[in-house]
Image (cartoon, rainbow, N blue to C red):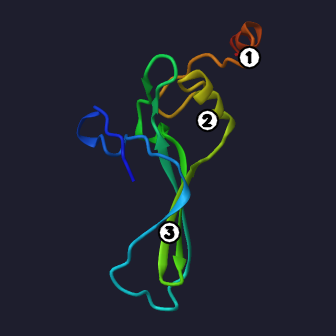
């Protein structure tokens, strides 16, 4: 698995955009697993931080990374791993524009390209 490193300071490993792995990677085991060790371990966490569409943009907080689902399958004396980004509306819009379009924990949004100028203006009149 290749991890892209960026220049985000001492915690750059935690801010590196992870690659989707759609074909399961099978680990090389150095020993055998007990028969009772089998199942699936699912994990979610931030995984997409850097946008390269148009101008380069990186989210400003660790919790703003878009969700990456990771799956470990354990059984038959083998362990495999694959991962996929959670395809939310927010993720798809951010990928299209090249930066977040909704308010994130520590990153301000850019205008939503699917809304008209009038639709963006209405909330400021109401509040």
Callout 2 touching callout 3 (CB < 8 Å): no
**Image depth: mark 3 or mark 1 in front:** 3
Specify which label sits upstream in the sequence, 3 or 1.
3
| Figure quadrant of residue 17 | top left
Specify which label sits upstream in the sequence, 2 or 1.
2
Q: Position of residue 50 (x, y in %)?
A: 44, 32
Task: Look at mark 1 in the image and give the residue it sits on.
Answer: 115
Q: Residue at x 73, y 19 (%)?
A: 114
| Figure quadrant of residue 32 | bottom left
Mark 3 neighbour density, 10 Å: few (under 14) some (14–19) many (20 or more): some
Q: Which residue is drawn at 38% across and 78% down?
A: 29
SS category of the residue bearing label 1: loop
Q: Which residue is drawn at 45% across and 91% down?
A: 34
The Cα–Cα distance between marks 2 and 1, rounded to whole angstroms, is 16 Å
Q: Is residue 123 above or below residue 22?
A: above
Callout 2 touching callout 1 (CB < 8 Å): no
The Cα–Cα distance between marks 2 and 3, rounded to whole angstroms, is 26 Å
**Image depth: mark 2 or mark 3 in front:** 3
The Cα–Cα distance between marks 3 and 1, rounded to whole angstroms, is 42 Å
Task: Look at mark 3 in the image and give the residue it sits on.
Answer: 80
Q: Residue at x 72, y 16 (%)?
A: 123
Number of dots carrying numbers: 3
Mark linked to residue 22: none
Task: Look at mark 2 in the image and give the residue it sits on.
Answer: 91
Camera sees residue 102: no
| 117, 127: nearer the viewer | 117
SS category of the residue bearing label 2: helix
């Amino acid at each position: 698995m290749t991890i892209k490193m960026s220049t985000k300071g001492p915690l750059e490993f935690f801010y590196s955009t992870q690659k989707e792995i759609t074909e399961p990677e099978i680990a090389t085991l150095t020993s055998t697993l007990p028969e009772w060790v089998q199942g699936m371990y699912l994990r979610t966490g931030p995984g997409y931080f850097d946008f390269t569409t148009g101008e380069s943009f990186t989210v400003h907080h660790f919790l703003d990374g878009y969700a990456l689902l990771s799956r470990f399958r354990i059984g038959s004396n083998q362990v495999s791993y694959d991962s996929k980004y959670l395809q939310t509306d927010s993720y798809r819009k951010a990928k299209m524009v090249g930066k977040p379009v909704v308010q994130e924990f520590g990153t301000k949004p850019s205008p939503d390209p699917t809304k008209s100028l009038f639709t963006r203006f209405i909330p400021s009149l109401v509040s």
